[in-house]
């Protein structure tokens, strides 16, 4: 079906299975009403709320085209509502959708190239003019790359576990596993040997908020390598990048190949090397994402130099909320490498009271120290002690 | 086996059915629901808290005359709480009795104590077996609260409608139950699970639909007060609050104002009852005062 292919190009994950289900569903509803067809396809083809807008635009555009060129498609008899059609043409059409339509005329040309690129643009680039500057990861110097490679080889987060509410068999466990006990009793014919179980342990989710503004440019590239290794090493990692706006790049980073993954991130994010609006972005995170990713006792790592263009305005309240909704908040600050670092900037002063841990992050040593910090003390009780790692680590 | 005589045959019939149960749905939801019934696929409902996701399953069960089985999810929910558990004390007793009866019955024992009479059935197993040949409505509520291992287990149940119990064998549903899965999106549900379901995002209702809902659910509230409450709440949703009020809050508020014998929204009674609508201190502080006063003024002039 043509329409499914358009959607797939636009970045919606639609497999052949879904197309079959969609056709099945269309048989059940009458196709006389446009909105019935719309919601039928919507409930089958869309599976997250963020895809709804793209679906609506694609749907409108697609049936409009079909009407303009009423060829062999039987669905082209669908009536166009009075509110559709004219109005849409004046509005700028999202770049991604336009891209998805354009190759349709000659489906063979460029298909291979499109295929590999299209699904990665999962975060919509709604307006092309907001792409301020695109970071080119190819230009990383060879020194840097070597260093990054070394980082990746060394840095695997040892898994800091917390107890979950699931159990596993354990000799020294405190609870009695009745099911296993009874099975043993049946086998032995009545002798009671208690089988025991203990809580299963698991690492908590990790949420990383990384600053990619101009002042952080040299570091953020290095951190991205680190974050890529992190995302591929364990599950339940969410990575957000922010400068003036917040973008979730978890799906882009999940690609196995680091170069491909970073290229995808480069395309998905629009505010490389610009200013920083920490308060604004933390607020956006709190409102839009915190309840979705901070469940189950997440640890938050915030990577920024704390130099805020808005001068720390509105930052305190948002930091407090963030702090209170996670298990542990760790702030990595590359500026902390200077022994004489003092929290002078407004942003830093406002943020400091709300973090559990404040550490340097500018070279291999400090990142290794972070790994150590992440891997212990998670169960050390409920007291959240504030620590500033020794700035002389380097 | 058909899934019952009364199951709706078209989208319009589904809309009728829901409104008979006192649920005022839009056409989008009715379409998804109709498809879910006709195609025997689970319906996955996502949306903010308090927009009436759970209510859909309840109304569906009531109007179709099916049994409603509800599985409330929580972290650590496991098979023994969701599907089945063996009745250990009874099994223990049976073993003791067998001992008293003598050695000869040992090999029979294993078969005996894993029989159906020692099985305690939990919601999922009940849903598959059904009662009196009628497939029930199975509500899996707030799936996002549970953890990934349970989600993975649900895959088997939701795609094949069968459950495997090692000691007993595989139990397959004669008629697949109507499954409604809800999520508040406190975490993303895995794509594999979503793929097996029909997806619908339950949004906040339009002002017109919300007025109809208030009228249906809080009949005692006057036309004018009901209208004012709705337009005030609609205004709040446009404010980018940390937690915008859902329909549940609207209804609670209308109820609360009724108990206080209010006839109209006033600045003072809004101030007094704001805690019914907004549940975060920051949000309340932002709305109380000017914003509330302006909201009351527009609500009264509009309604």
Image (cartoon, coloured by chain):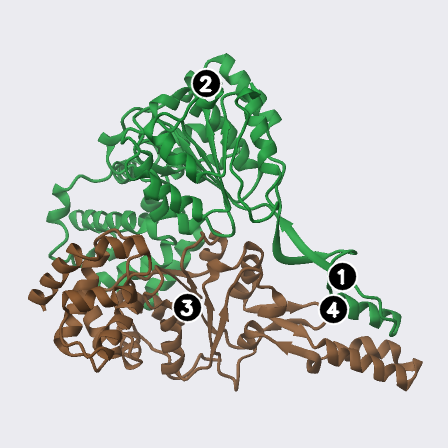
Chain colours: A green, B brown
Q: Nearer the viewer, residue B149 or B294?
A: B294
Which residue matches tag 2?
A340
Label 1 marks a residue whose chain is: A
Which residue matches tag 4?
A178
Provide the secondary structure element on which disc 2 rests. loop
Mark 2 or 3, which is nearer the eye?
2
Mark 3 or 4, which is nearer the eye?
4
Residue B226: x and y in percent read: 17, 73
Residue at the limit of the structure toward the right, as seen here: B103
Could you say which disc has been placed on residue A196 in the image? 1
Provide the secondary structure element on which disc 4 rests. helix
Q: Nearer the viewer, residue A107 or A276?
A: A276
Quadrant position of the C terminus of chain A in the picture: top right
Residue A1: x and y in percent read: 34, 51
Mark 2 vs mark 3: tell me if same chain: no
Mark 4 vs mark 1: tell me if same chain: yes
- Residue placed at 36% from the left, 54% from the top? A45
Mark 1 vs mark 2: tell me if same chain: yes
Label 4 marks a residue whose chain is: A
- Residue placed at 50% from the left, 70% from the top? B71
Relative to A72, does residue B98 appear above or below in the rendering?
Answer: below
Residue A15: x and y in percent read: 43, 49
């Amino acid at each position: 079906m043509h329409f499914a292919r358009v959607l797939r190009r636009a970045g919606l994950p639609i497999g052949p299975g879904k197309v079959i289900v969609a056709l099945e569903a269309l048989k059940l509803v009458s196709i006389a009403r446009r909105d019935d067809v719309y919601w039928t396809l919507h409930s089958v083809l869309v599976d997250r709320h963020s895809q709804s807008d793209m679906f609506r635009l694609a749907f409108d555009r697609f049936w409009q085209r079909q009407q303009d060129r009423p060829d062999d498609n039987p669905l082209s008899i669908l009536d166009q509502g009075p509110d559709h059609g004219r109005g849409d043409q004046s509005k700028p059409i999202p770049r991604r959708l336009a891209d998805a339509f354009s190759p349709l005329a000659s489906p063979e040309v460029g298909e291979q190239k499109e295929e590999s690129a299209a699904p990665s643009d999962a975060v919509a680039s709604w307006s092309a003019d907001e792409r301020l500057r695109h970071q080119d990861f190819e230009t990383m110097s060879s020194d840097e790359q070597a260093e990054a490679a070394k980082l990746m080889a060394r840095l695997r987060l040892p898994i800091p576990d917390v107890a979950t509410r699931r159990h596993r068999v354990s000799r020294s466990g405190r609870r009695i596993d009745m099911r296993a006990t009874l099975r043993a009793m049946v086998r032995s014919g009545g002798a009671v040997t208690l089988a025991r179980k203990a809580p299963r342990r698991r690492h908590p989710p990790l949420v990383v908020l990384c600053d990619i503004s101009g002042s952080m440019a040299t570091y953020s590239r290095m951190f991205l390598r680190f974050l890529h290794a992190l995302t591929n090493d364990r599950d339940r990692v969410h990575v957000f990048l922010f400068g003036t706006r917040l973008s979730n790049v978890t799906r882009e980073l999940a690609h196995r190949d680091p170069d491909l993954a970073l290229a995808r991130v480069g395309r998905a994010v629009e505010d490389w090397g610009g200013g920083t609006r920490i308060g604004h972005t933390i607020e956006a995170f709190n409102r839009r994402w915190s309840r979705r990713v901070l469940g189950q006792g997440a640890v938050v790592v915030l990577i920024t130099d704390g130099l805020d263009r808005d001068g720390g305005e509105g930052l305190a309240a948002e930091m407090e909320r963030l702090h209170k909704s996670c298990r542990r908040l760790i702030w990595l600050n590359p500026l902390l490498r200077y022994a004489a670092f003092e929290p002078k900037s407004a942003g830093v002063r406002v943020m400091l009271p709300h973090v559990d841990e404040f550490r340097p992050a500018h070279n291999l040593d400090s990142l290794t120290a972070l790994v150590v910090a992440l891997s212990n003390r998670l169960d050390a009780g409920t007291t959240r002690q504030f620590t500033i790692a020794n700035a002389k680590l380097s | 086996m058909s899934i019952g005589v009364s199951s709706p045959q078209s989208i319009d019939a589904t809309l009728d059915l829901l409104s008979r149960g006192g649920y005022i749905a839009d056409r989008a939801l009715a379409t998804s629901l109709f498809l879910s019934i006709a195609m025997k696929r689970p319906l996955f409902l996502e949306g903010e808290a308090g927009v009436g996701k759970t209510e859909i399953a309840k109304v569906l069960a009531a109007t179709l005359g099916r049994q409603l089985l509800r599985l409330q999810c929580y972290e650590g929910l496991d098979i023994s709480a969701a599907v089945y558990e063996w009745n250990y004390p009874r099994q223990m007793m049976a073993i003791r009795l067998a001992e008293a009866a003598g050695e000869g019955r040992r090999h029979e024992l294993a078969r005996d104590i894993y029989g159906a009479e020692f099985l305690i059935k939990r919601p999922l197993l009940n849903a598959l077996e059904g009662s009196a040949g009628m497939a029930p409505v199975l509500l899996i509520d707030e799936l996002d609260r549970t953890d990934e291992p349970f989600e993975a287990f649900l895959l088997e149940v939701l795609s094949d409608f069968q459950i495997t119990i090692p000691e007993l064998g595989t139990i397959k549903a004669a008629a697949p139950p109507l499954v409604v899965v809800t999520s508040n999106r406190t975490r993303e549900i895995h794509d594999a699970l979503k793929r097996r379901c029909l997806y619908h995002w339950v949004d906040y209702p339009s002002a017109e639909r919300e007025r109809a809902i208030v009228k249906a659910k809080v009949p005692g509230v006057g036309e004018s007060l009901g209208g004012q409450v709705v337009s005030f709440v609609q205004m709040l949703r446009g404010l980018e609050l940390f937690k915008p009020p859902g329909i549940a809050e609207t209804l609670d508020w209308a109820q609360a104002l009724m108990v206080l014998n209010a006839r109209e929204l006033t600045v003072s009674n809004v101030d007094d009852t704001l805690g019914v609508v907004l549940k975060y201190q920051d949000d309340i502080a932002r709305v109380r005062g000017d914003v509330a006063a302006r909201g009351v003024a527009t609500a009264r002039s509009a309604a």
